[in-house]
Amino acid sequence: GATVGVLGGGQLGRMLALAGSAMGYRFVALDPAEDGPAAQVGGSITAAYDDRAAARELAERCDVITYEFENVDAGVAAMLMEQSYVPQGSELLYTTQHRLREKRAVEAAGARVAPYAEIRSEDELREATARLGLPAVLKTATGGYDGKGQWVIRSEEEIPAAYAELSRTGADLVLEQFIRFAKELSVIAARSSLGEVRVFPPAENVHVDNILHLSIVPARVAPEVLAEAERLALRIVEGLGAVGLVAVELFLTEDGGLYVNELAPRPHNSGHYTMEACRTSQFEQHVRAVCGLPLGDPSLLSPVVMVNLLGQHVEPAVARLSAPDGEAERLGVAPKLHLYGKAEAKPGRKMGHVNVLAPDADAALAWIQGTGIWQAENDAIR
Ligand code: ATP
Ligand code: MG
Ligand code: MG
């Protein structure tokens, strides 16, 4: 079996290693944390992501290199490509680690994004908000996640503060029109190093405080919307000439319009449902794609709702799952617990998730409602 090196050792690296180990591959994760989620299930190198000597060691120990986050240092990526096999290349990273480049690539692939403008000064911000309308979302072009590096500007008075706060990061800035979406969807497409493409069933995503809370599959939208979302994801993965997984986050408007929010060139939290609910999981698919194997069948085996376990949810969820559960039986649901092996259950930190396999979304949501993970905001989605 070949050895796969992974830049990053969080939960995505852990679940890649778990899936790939079953297929006979060995894994080595490079991560600054010593006993992180991936290091617990495979080999590891403890070093900063931009540590050249550590990257060289990773290249020496591995036959194939991939990554579990998109902010890989360009110099490190170039060095790894010289010394090892990086089937995903560096172009995909270069594109997806910068919102402006990403939006241009999405448009070039024939998909829509929210109207946007590059912002280089407070004057430009003032001018762009006048053109795009309020509310509008100011975002750092690089480095943001879980809504960090964003400011929803609702009135002109907020412009100076929003500009001051985000320009302080030193990152390029982009202003996006605020899309009044009816739903958020995501689609994960895979393209192998041999050029084969497959797409997973779209997920309907619910965020709370900018962090993914639920993914509902099948998404409760018209069949034409599902088909169009899948087509868009395939167009993007092919347009980018990507290898591996590309997650496409979408806004669906009331009139059926789809806008691409952002891309992620890796396994995605909204794809965790695939672990039990699809014939091939996103993690197995990624390993297949980067290792040059034929892609697996992504079709759905069962309706499912994935619910994230943040620090504050772990105790109630584990308690519920450790006792006989007549409610699960009554509803006909099978909740599957995944924990990432993180030591400290800080509030807001992603500690694990539960895939609730069910006869339909309502049954899964009813089970989750009784767990202590349920959020008041959810009452609107049932
Ligand atoms: P992630 O953790 O998904 O990487 P992120 O920090 O990169 O998050 P985005 O995905 O850009 O941030 O935005 C986070 C959330 O904020 C979106 O899922 C959506 O709910 C909301 N949002 C972002 N941009 C817009 C927009 N232009 N219009 C309306 N809502 C938006
Ligand atoms: Mg993002
Ligand atoms: Mg996002």
Image (cartoon, grey):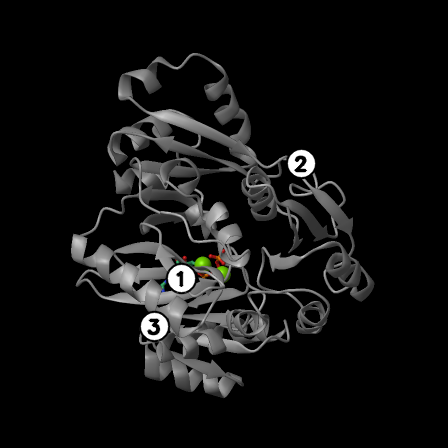
Q: Secondary structure at mark 3?
A: loop
The reply, left or right, for residue 300 in relation to residue 296 is left
- Tell me the tag on residue 322: none
Q: Nearer the viewer, residue 63 or 104?
A: 63
Relative height, residue 352 to residue 238 (above, below): above
- Residue 133 in view, yes or no: yes
Relative height, residue 286 to residue 131 (above, below): above
Q: Secondary structure at mark 2?
A: loop
Q: Residue type at mark 1: give it.
A: Glu
Q: Are circles 2 and 3 on residues that touch, CB within 8 Å?
A: no
Confirm if mark 3 falls within 8 A of ligand 1: yes
Nearer the observer: mark 1 or 3; the answer is: 1
Q: CA distance from mark 2 to mark 3?
A: 38 Å
Percent position of residue 157, x then y: 44, 74
Q: Residue at x 62, y 45 (%)?
A: 25
Bin the neighbour count of mark 2 within 10 Å (Cα to Cα): few under 14, some 14-19, many 20 and up.
few
Which residue does the numbered mark 1 point to in the structure image?
Answer: 196
- Tell me the tag on residue 344: 2
Mark sitting earlier along the chain (2/3): 3
Q: Secondary structure at mark 1?
A: loop
Q: Are circles 2 and 1 on residues that touch, CB within 8 Å?
A: no
The reply, left or right, for residue 206 in relation to residue 61 is left
Which residue does the numbered mark 3 point to in the structure image?
Answer: 114
